[in-house]
């Protein structure tokens, strides 16, 4: 560690759920080609999708039967979201990279912080321990999870070094998405942090400490 922080609050690394990170298709040089997530279906793709479905939809309404609409709709949507397609072993068909954040929230651009808070509303946590003690570990849940684990180990080391602490908290946000879900601290001491999660649905964020 470059310095030791005596604030009394361990830093927290947020482990987001599926769909809580930005992802892009990239070429062999790593240059971005198009958005993978959140989906970005442009006007041309939308028009193509409508043209593909309007005929089957009209036939279905006219004859009061499916008339191939379900099959055509599935094919059209699969084509529109092809960038997210994967092989049976879980690896992406296209080269996909997640936008990562190699520092605490306090070092991120405003647009990145807004996106993160929109995905997971843990602002009360950041207000209490400081954005310089909150880190967001962006990753993709598809593909080689061993690589993700290796990245997380390195990320933990980085968080310890930048925050000046010898331990970090891992806050997972997996479960059903809920716009009312929040993660807030209920009290802090020099050696531990007690947490409570308020969640409209049954699945709440969980937290563990890494030595």
Image (spheres, helix red, strand yellow):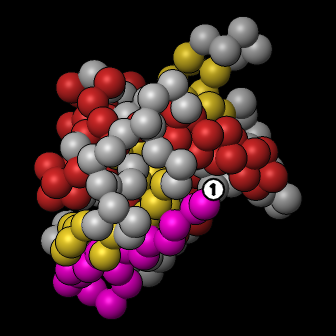
Q: Nearer the viewer, residue 60 or 190?
A: 190
Q: Residue at position x 68%, y 47% from top?
A: 153
- Quadrant for the C terminus, please: bottom right
Picture quarter with the N terminus: top right
Return the residue found at the far right. Answer: 89
Residue at x 75% of width, y 45% of height: 150
Q: Is residue 164 magenta?
A: no
| Whether residue 114 is situated above or below residue 180 in the rendered picture | above
Image-quadrant location for residue 186: bottom left
Q: Residue furthest bottom?
A: 202
Magenta span: 195-211
Residue 144's place in the image compared with 210, above or below, is above
Quarter location, residue 16 = bottom left
Q: Is residue 107 left or right of residue 164?
A: left
Is 205 magenta? The answer is yes
Q: Position of residue 38 (x, y in %)?
A: 40, 42
Position of residue 86 relative to residue 198, above or below, is above
Query: In the image shown, does 3 or 126 lie closer to the viewer?
Result: 3
SS at mark 1?
loop
Relative to 179, say whether 45 is above or below.
above
Residue 56 x %, y %: 45, 59
* Residue at 21% across, 80% down: 198
Q: Position of residue 19 (x, y in %)?
A: 45, 54
From the image, tell me which residue sits under label 1: 141
Residue 155: x percent and y percent? 59, 40
Label 1 crowding class (10 Å Cα cut-off): few <14, some 14-19, many 20+?
few
**Nearer the observer, 121 or 161:** 161
């Amino acid at each position: 560690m470059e310095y030791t922080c005596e604030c009394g609050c361990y830093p927290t690394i947020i482990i987001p759920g599926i769909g809580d990170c930005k992802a892009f298709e990239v070429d062999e040089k790593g240059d971005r080609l198009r958005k993978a997530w959140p989906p970005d279906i442009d006007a041309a793709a939308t028009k193509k999708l409508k043209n593909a479905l309007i005929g089957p939809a009209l036939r279905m309404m006219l004859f009061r039967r499916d008339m191939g609409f379900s099959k055509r709709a599935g094919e059209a949507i699969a084509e529109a979201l092809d960038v997210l397609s994967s092989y049976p072993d879980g690896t992406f068909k296209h080269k996909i990279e997640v936008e990562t954040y190699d520092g605490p929230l306090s070092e991120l651009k405003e647009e990145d912080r807004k996106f993160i808070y929109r995905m997971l509303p843990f602002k009360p946590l950041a207000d209490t321990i400081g954005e310089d003690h909150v880190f967001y570990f962006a990753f993709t849940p598809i593909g080689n999870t061993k690589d993700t684990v290796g990245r997380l180990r390195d990320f933990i080391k980085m968080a310890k070094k930048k925050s000046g602490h010898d331990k970090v908290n891992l806050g997972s946000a997996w479960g059903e998405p809920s716009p009312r879900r929040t993660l807030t601290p209920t009290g802090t001491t020099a050696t531990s942090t007690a947490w409570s999660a308020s969640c409209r649905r049954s699945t709440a964020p969980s937290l563990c400490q890494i030595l």
